[in-house]
Amino acid sequence: MPLLGERLGGRGGTEDTSKRNLLRVRSFRSAFTEFEQVLPSLMETQPALLTKLYSDCQSFAETEIKSLLERSDSPPRQNDEPL
């Protein structure tokens, strides 16, 4: 089972892009050292929990990206700050 978030590196694009994405995910995760320490144990004992966490994060990211895209497609309102 890939580590949490590493699946992001495999989505389309070139091999270099995938490697850069994987490095960015690993760099982000390294900011959470406590989670990094318990991750191997969680992968063995709580795989369903990790799958749910990954799925929830993916859904959140998709929702936020869609929202940003929708806002960038519509003309800015007077009180909106530029993206």
Image: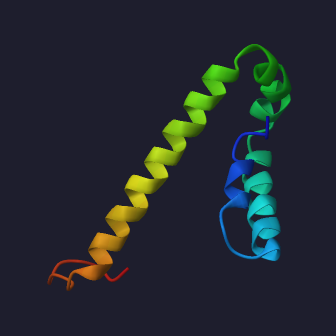
The picture quadrant where one finds residue 9 is bottom right
Q: Where is residue 12? Give x, y as percent.
A: 66, 68
Residue 54 is situated, as x and y percent measured from the top left of the image, at 60, 38
The structure residue drawn at horizontal position 20% and vertical position 86%, both measured from the top left corner, is 75
| Count of marks, rendered view | 0
38, above or below 70, in the image: above
Left or right side of 54 for 26 = right
Q: Does 8 sit above or below residue 41?
A: below
Is 68 left, or right, of 73 in this rendering?
right
User: What residue is at 14 percent from the left and 84 percent from the top?
Assistant: 78
Quarter in which the C terminus is drawn: bottom left
Q: Residue most toward the left?
A: 78
Q: From the top left corner, tell me how far across and down residue 37 is, in percent.
A: 85, 29
- Quick one: which residue is furthest to the top in this view? 45
Q: Residue at x 44, y 55 (%)?
A: 62
Q: Nearer the viewer, residue 25 or 62?
A: 62
Viewer-proximal residue, 77 or 69? 69
Q: Residue at x 53, y 43 (%)?
A: 57
Q: Is residue 64 left or right of residue 58?
A: left
The colour mode here is rainbow
Q: Position of residue 2 (x, y in %)?
A: 79, 40
Residue 23 vertical position relative to residue 50 in the rendered view, above or below: below
Q: Is residue 21 above or below residue 54?
A: below
Q: Which quadrant would the N terminus be assigned to in this image? A: top right
